[in-house]
Image: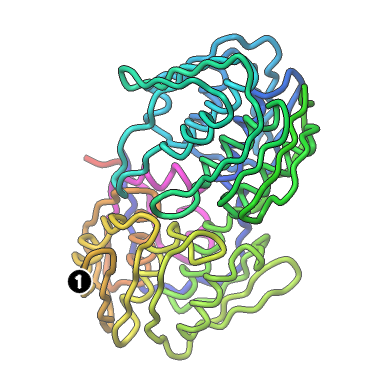
Amino acid sequence: MEKLVIRGGRPLKGSVQVSGSKNASLPILAAALLTDELCVLEGVPALRDVATMIRLLRNFGAKVTQEGHRIIVDPRGYQNTEAPYKLVSTMRASFCVLGPLLAKHRQAKVSLPGGCVIGPRPVDIHLKGLKALGAHLNIDGGYVYGKTRELRGTTIYLGGAYGSSVLGTANVMMAAALARGRTLIENAACEPEVTDLANVLIKMGAKIQGQGTPVVAVEGVRRLNGFTHKVIPDRIEAGTFMLAAAVTGGELIIQGARPDHLGAVIDKMKEAGIEIKGQDGSLKVSPRKRLRPVDVTTLPYPGFPTDMQAQMMALMCQAPGISVITEKIYPDRFMHVAELGRMGAQIKLEGASAIVQGVRRLSGAPVMASDLRASAALVLAAMAAKGTSEVSRIYHLDRGYDRIDEKLTRLGAEIQREKME
């Protein structure tokens, strides 16, 4: 196991390239199971989660070749339709194979993804949508067993307790692409990652309208072709670098960042006093003059993303005054609060809200990451803190950020990756 040793107090400066989107790449790779033709995905980030998805595709019998950030999937002749616990348990997005397997082979055995430290994330929306299409699903021994004679299009409302489901929408949309007739998905997730998947399915020959809106129409086709596609930039990585510049008082040019995917983050950062400008396919974050506290509420896209909540909290820990950060997507997603407290942050939890009283300066401390985005928040806080911090359990970080410690080091941060004793 590894840790990051970070000496704070060094403003970041320079230019950084955003990697391809993790949350778009994983469902798109699952979509290769819908066809018998070669699929090529470019710009894929080098992440643990991507490696897990490759292992899962090979488990089914697909041939997968990785050439740097390019992945070639040859699904011809794959027959296995079981997704084992040892793979699905390590990455929730693995559950996205259920829809393609049912659509292509009319049967599937897929492990339930299990629990998560950021709170319960049930798959009931996935199951509801696939059942509406005609799948017979049973849960036994921690697995979902699915069979169908034929998937048929219908009208499906995919609402959940905390809004739409990105992976649920992806699963249903992929299954509907090979269903007979027309499927209308109401309360569909609008995230750019869902739109990117829809665009890939269209390249494969699917008939889809309304992607990026709450109502998506899918007209099923008999077969789908292969594809070649370059994945969209990772908006969460871009937002993390934006906040890294802000917490250290630095100046960064973030190449490949798409302002149209980051509207809510840009708005809140500007409200906090951070200067952000778009220029030639990039975003420039300039040194702050005076940091102001802001209130943030996470919401489904295009609202403020839950995956940026922890990183935004790291910035608000330094803002004089009181900020209120409310989590509407995963109300239990505050595991990072106690660790930020070890660095001197003043945060009080009240239900689904964190009340943050800004301090003059955080101080270095040994801290432990609990999940992917909490890891990023602790790294940001450590770079802003006085002294040295050790961030342990960084395997979470490697699940979602492509060599982020190396990128930050090139921008002026003092970070070393070391083996834990």
The percent coordinates of residue 342 (x first, y second) are 19, 64
Residue appearing at x 59%, y 66% in the figure: 262
User: Is residue 404 placed above or below 149 in the rendered structure?
Assistant: below
User: Is residue 384 placed above or below 150 in the rendered structure?
Assistant: below
Residue appearing at x 41%, y 70% in the figure: 297
Judge by depth and name the residue closer to the eye, 203 or 208. Answer: 208
Q: Which residues are magenta?
A: 390-418
Q: Is residue 407 magenta?
A: yes
The residue under label 1 is: 348
Instruction: Indicate the quadrant where residue 74 lies.
Output: top right
Residue appearing at x 56%, y 52% in the figure: 187
Q: How many marks?
A: 1
Judge by depth and name the residue closer to the eye, 387 or 315. Answer: 315
The percent coordinates of residue 314 (x first, y second) are 35, 69
The percent coordinates of residue 72 (x first, y second) are 70, 27
Q: Amino acid at mark 1?
A: Lys
Left or right of 182 on screen, residue 187: left
